Amino acid sequence: MLPSTNVGNVEGTNIQLAPVHPQRRKRFTIDTVIHYWIAVVLVAGMAFPLCWMLYSSLKTNREIFASPFALPQRMRLGHFVEAWQVGNLGRFYLNSIFVTLTSVVIIVTVSSLAAYAFARFTFKGRDVLYYTFLIGLMLPPQVVIIPLYILLRDLNMLNTYWSLILPYSAWSLSVSIFLLRSFYLTLPGELEDAAKIDGASLFQTFRLVMLPLIRPALVTVVVLNIVNLWNEFLFALLFIQDEARRTLPAGMLNFYGYHQVDYRLVFSGLSIVTIPILIAFFFFQKQVINGLTISGVER
């Protein structure tokens, strides 16, 4: 006999819940525990390199080589100050902030307008142009590095901030347009009709009605592009030879000498570069997840 639960009596009639099989309840519990353990293992595997980098920055070079995975014998916060001064990270920070924010402003402006046109308007060649943009999702940057270098050289743009800003902006438009267009398609067209009836122009409808509604997708685009551009290394290394204009990833090469590497400063510099962007992503992760989830729905 399977157990049942009596939850009440309505006009003399006993109401009982459906019996729950003990093995089914046990199986569900075991599955839940397994899923949680898998999640814990995955999180630990992804978090360990970050933790290892942080506590290695507090160790001496002798400790790093003697026992790479052991905890430091004592806290040496002076390594961060030394890394900041030796690596000239203050200048590189300003360069990265300027290049990243300028690129993100261009990306958000162009992609929001282009995605709105692809989602709401019908014109000749719309689908061809849209899928042309999406080709950028399939091409790695290494494919175009040589012709792009030649183009920037012929335009006398090497060793300038624009040699990074323009390629960053162009390369990030594909995924940004894809996400924003998908979000636009989830919005009802009656909103734009109501704005037209109220006398709003096309740009007013876009600015006052559509942009506030796609705010989750805009936050997603901003955060994803900031993370990607902040960590970009290849373009920053090849297109900028002037050290005064280098960004943080390329500037980290200052810690590598010809004959030896000061690993304690390398780990300290990497921590200084990585921690701010991780904190920003931690605070906006909910908006990013919501934006990606909603943007994944297309008509």
Image (tube, rainbow, N blue to C red):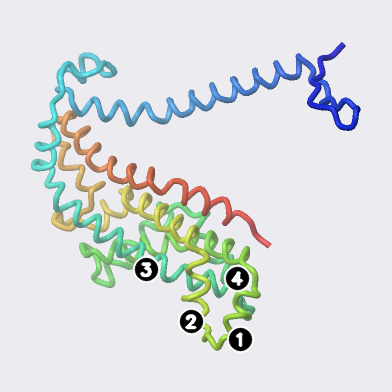
Whole-angstrom CA distance, mark 1 to mark 2, is: 13 Å
Residue 228 x %, y %: 38, 51
Amino acid type, callout 3: Ile
**Residue hosting label 4:** 119
Residue 243 x %, y %: 15, 53
Q: Earlier in the sequence, mark 1 or mark 4?
A: 4
Q: Residue at x 20, y 54 (%)?
A: 246
Relative to 75, residue 290 above or below: below
Q: Earlier in the sequence, mark 4 or mark 3?
A: 3
**Residue 269, image quadrant:** top left
Marker disc for residue 197: 1
Q: Classify mark 1: helix, strand or loop.
A: helix
Relative to 294, residue 259 above or below: above
Q: Classify mark 4: helix, strand or loop.
A: helix
Label 3 crowd bin: few (<14), some (14–19), many (20+), radius 10 Å: some
Whole-angstrom CA distance, mark 1 to mark 4, is: 21 Å
| CB atoms of marks 1 and 2 within 8 Å | no
Marker disc for residue 106: 3
**Residue hosting label 2:** 204
Quick one: 284 or 230, which is closer to the camera?
Answer: 284
Q: Classify mark 3: helix, strand or loop.
A: helix
Q: Residue furthest top?
A: 1
**Residue 38, image quadrant:** top right
Q: Nearer the viewer, mark 3 or mark 2?
A: 2
Q: Does 12 sit left or right of 235 as displayed?
A: right
Quick one: 139 or 134, which is closer to the camera?
Answer: 134
Whole-angstrom CA distance, mark 4 to mark 3, is: 20 Å
Q: Nearer the viewer, mark 1 or mark 2?
A: 1
Relative to 145, residue 63 above or below: above
Q: Nearer the viewer, mark 1 or mark 3?
A: 1
Residue 6 x %, y %: 81, 22
Whole-angstrom CA distance, mark 1 to mark 3, is: 31 Å
